[in-house]
Image (tube, coloured by chain):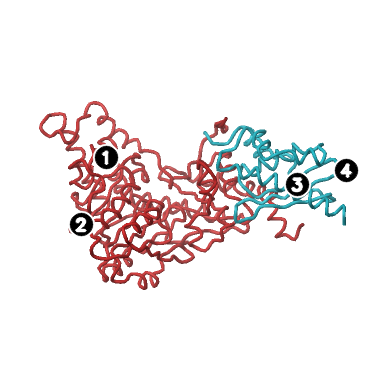
Chain colours: A red, B cyan
Amino acid sequence: MLYYFVVSPMKRVYFDNGSTTPVDKRVLEAMLPYFTELFGNPSSVLIEEGGAPRAAVDEARHRVADLVNAKPDEIIFTSSATEANNLAIKGLVLANREKRKRILFSDIEHYSVMLQADYLRSLGFEIDYVRVDEYGVVDLDDLRKKATVDVLLASIMHANLEIGTIQPVGEIAMILKERGIIFHSDGAGACGMIPVDVKGLGVDVMTISAHQFNGPKGAAALYLRTGVSLKTIMHGGFQEMGYRGGTENVPALVGFGEASRIAKEEMSDKVRRLTFLGRKLWDGIGSQITDLHFTGHPTQRLPGHVSFWIEFVEGESLLLWLNLNGVASASGSACASNLLAADETGLKASHVLTAVGVPPEICHGSITFSLGKDNTEEEADHVISVLPSIVDRLREMSPLFDKSKGGT
Amino acid sequence: MAGPYSDKVMDHFMHPRNMGEIEDASGVGEVGNPACGDVMRLYLKIEDNRIVDAKFKTFGCGAAIASSSMTTEMIKGKTIDEALEISNQAVAEALGGLPPAKEHCSVLAEDALKAALEDYKKKQSG
């Protein structure tokens, strides 16, 4: 019998915005009418009930397009970033399969990209993986080498939520364009958090996720550049220009639109604040804890994102103790990420951390703090103050720690 | 705040029993490897074929620490034969159950006990 434990009712410090963010109150307000009063089906264009929902979805499309500098008819709504990544890769491959036979992924893609590999191989494609350097930045020389003229599609993310690194997307796009390779970029970690301009960057297809920037869950989108062909993988309706059948989740899309408007308007202030808080946390932790190693790129990273591993300290234990001290974080620890798995076969060190050269045993000690727009300096101070004593306690218990100090 | 661990697991995780080392241990067993994420070292003090003290050090997740702690509680005062009869399932049960993906953590504790007793026997015969 599992028991759900209760943590003392202290004020929570939520530093796990990479997992999801709270819905902005303005976003919720915008959504509410579309559950009850304006409940109509946007496809019911000949009756009055369909009018306002149709207009609301169109408006949301404009706002999402505006966030990434796309045209509204280049935005396809989906239910999640995972769905958008599936639609992008499968849809592009199915529409262009006669042309070329190879596909490139980077070594640090999200599972919703990585785990499509077997399916793509079953269609006769060969998958090749582009290396990243120790900071998690795509190795452009390796990309140039692997981006041969028989490559159909490359899927390389914009920003990684586990280690915070932002890729040189513009340079990657240029390399791929020269070779006629379609470029999909998973922008779930970047869009709404940093300025993203799909035209300026030169990407062909990009995934955008609402709940990563204070929009609702259940809403995401795919930017599809005009002229790039894509086949649907969700048959049964003419919605979303035929690319994605199914009645629109109107309230969620309205929320997505409002979150995009707010993110764009408040972007520069948010980036400035989060960069400051992230730097403070980075310096505060780094100066107090010995044998701590930051992961990801020191500057080319998401604002307010701090990730690291600590020698002789296991990640899940650290995460649990932080939680007991009121702090929500994430761990790249195999155990923490698969705790709800049916068995232990899924317990593997994070592929992102192994790709940046962190040894597997170390991957069990990684922690990610991802701050959001509502976090404060006081909260960063709290984390800086509680972390050292937690680390001391876990090291005291660790048989690996005393070994390194010349013990038994 | 909800989690998949039982209250017993969280209690032993937050307040581990018998954590530490025994300097003149009769037997020491270390099992696991860092690549699996868990390493446990168990120290036993044995007198007249009976475990009079047990201490542990563990690098691992919540379930690994709780299993280590519970195992030391369960074997203290037991004879060697009695201790060897304690299965990893018994440890997991005493903890109010472990999530399926974490059952291997209780095996770690069982293995550490066997390794420590092996070490003890070796020291006796040597």
CA distance for labels 2 and 3: 64 Å
Crowding at dot 3, Cα within 10 Å, few <14 / some 14-19 / many 20+, comes out as: some
Which chain is mark 4 on?
B
Gap between marks 1 and 3, in whole Å? Answer: 55 Å
Q: In which quarter of the image is residue A259?
A: top left
Compare residues B60 and A279 and report the one nearer the observer: B60
Q: Which residue is drawn at 69% across and 49% down?
A: B40
Q: How many labels does the image show?
A: 4
Residue A229 bears which disc, if any? 2
Q: Name the residue under label 1.
A: A253
Q: Name the residue under label 4.
A: B47
Q: Mark 3 points at which residue?
A: B20
Closer to the camera: disc 4 or disc 3?
4
| Front residue of this view, candidates A60 and A356 | A356
Three-letter amino acid code at the position of disc 1: Leu
The three-letter code of the residue at mark 3 reads Gly
User: Could you tell me residue B32's position as x and y percent?
Assistant: 66, 52
Q: Are marks 1 and 3 on the same chain?
A: no
C-alpha gap between disc 2 and disc 1? 24 Å
Left or right: B120 as drawn, with respect to A301 = right
Crowd band around label 4 with a 10 angstrom C-alpha radius: few (<14), some (14–19), many (20+): few
x, y percent for residue A70: 22, 54
